[in-house]
Image: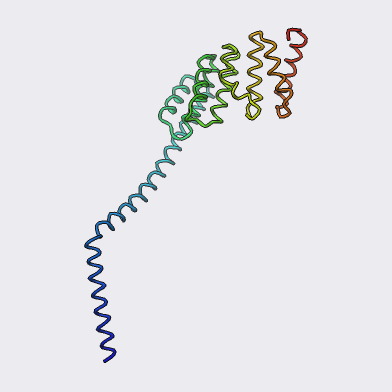
């Protein structure tokens, strides 16, 4: 009798659970399916995005290498066209690399003013990583030593000439050269002396600065 009672109770419990499940499904089945679909779609989307990302990056990398090869073959105009396209349509870091390489090619072609403007624009672009911005500013400054005035060079790199900046040595050299070229030997001496006095200045930069300090001293102009 006890066994029959236990069996009857189990059957009742199973029916109750079945009815509860039906009730729950009737109320929340649509939500459960929607959540499941979203999870599946999210997974597919993530995989698809990763695939697209890898493909886009690879395609941009190939395009960049092709542009570099054109430059090596002295097909400068074709290389610049390829780099300009990559700047507009490239993925990841390649648009910035394309801008830098294009500016370098302009400088090599003798288009110094255009190259300086291009580097300066990269240096002011807040979407570009800070280290690349600073490197571009320095490149612009060195070009402007030949084509611009001291104020133009200063606008590019004087903010980099502070003791805390890792690029201060090159920034000071560009400023010193610009001042020397403009005939402001006292200002040039100040910048070159800062290089010599900085124990962390690279040896080659220190050597050039000391040589120019010696020239200024010998001239008696400062």
Q: How many marks?
A: 0
Q: Nearer the viewer, residue 138 or 64?
A: 138
User: Is 104 situated left or right of 212 in this image?
Assistant: left
Could you tell me which quadrant the C terminus lies in?
Answer: top right
Q: In this picture, is 99 found above or below 114?
A: below
User: Which of the 4 image quadrants contains residue 50?
Assistant: top left
Residue 212 position by quadrant: top right
Task: Please give the name of the residue rendered at 67% of the width and 12% of the height, measured from the top-left corner.
Answer: 180
Q: Nearer the viewer, residue 111 or 126?
A: 126
Q: Position of residue 68 (x, y in %)?
A: 51, 27
In the rendered image, the vertical position of residue 56 relative to residue 135, given as above or below? below
Residue at the image position 71 percent from the left and 24 percent from the top = 204
Can you give x and y, in whole percent of width and height, for residue 214 in the image? 76, 14
Q: Position of residue 129 (x, y in %)?
A: 52, 32
Based on the displayed image, in which of its 4 quarters is residue 184 positioned? Answer: top right
Q: Residue at x 56, y 20 (%)?
A: 156
Up the image or down, 45 lies above or below 79; here it is: below
In this picture the colour scheme is rainbow
How far across and down, in percent of the image, does residue 117 sit? 50, 18
140 relative to 190 in the view: left or right: left
> Which residue: 60% across, 21% down?
158
Location of the N terminus (image quadrant): bottom left
In the picture, measured across the screen, residue 101 lies left or right of residue 44, that is right
Given residues 113 and 200, the one toward you in this image is 200
């Amino acid at each position: 009798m006890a066994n029959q009672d236990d069996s009857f109770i189990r059957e009742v419990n199973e029916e109750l659970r079945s009815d509860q499940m039906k009730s729950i499904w009737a109320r929340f089945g649509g939500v459960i399916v929607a959540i499941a679909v979203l999870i599946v779609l999210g997974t597919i989307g993530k995989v698809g995005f990763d695939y697209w990302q890898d493909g886009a990056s690879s395609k941009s990398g190939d395009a960049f290498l092709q542009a570099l090869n054109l430059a090596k073959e002295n097909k400068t105009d074709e290389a610049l066209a390829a780099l300009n396209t990559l700047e507009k349509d490239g993925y990841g870091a390649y648009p910035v690399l394309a801008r830098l390489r294009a500016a370098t090619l302009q400088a090599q072609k003798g288009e110094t003013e255009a190259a300086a403007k291009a580097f300066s624009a990269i240096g002011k672009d807040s979407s570009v990583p800070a280290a690349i911005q600073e490197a571009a500013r320095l490149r612009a400054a060195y070009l402007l030593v030949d084509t611009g005035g001291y104020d133009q060079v200063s606008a590019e790199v004087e903010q980099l000439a502070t003791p805390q900046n890792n690029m201060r040595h090159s920034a000071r050299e560009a400023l010193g050269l610009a001042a020397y070229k403009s005939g402001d030997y006292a200002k040039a001496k100040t910048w070159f002396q800062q290089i010599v006095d900085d124990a962390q200045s690279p040896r080659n930069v220190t050597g050039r600065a000391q040589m120019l300090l010696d020239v200024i001293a010998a001239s008696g102009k400062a």
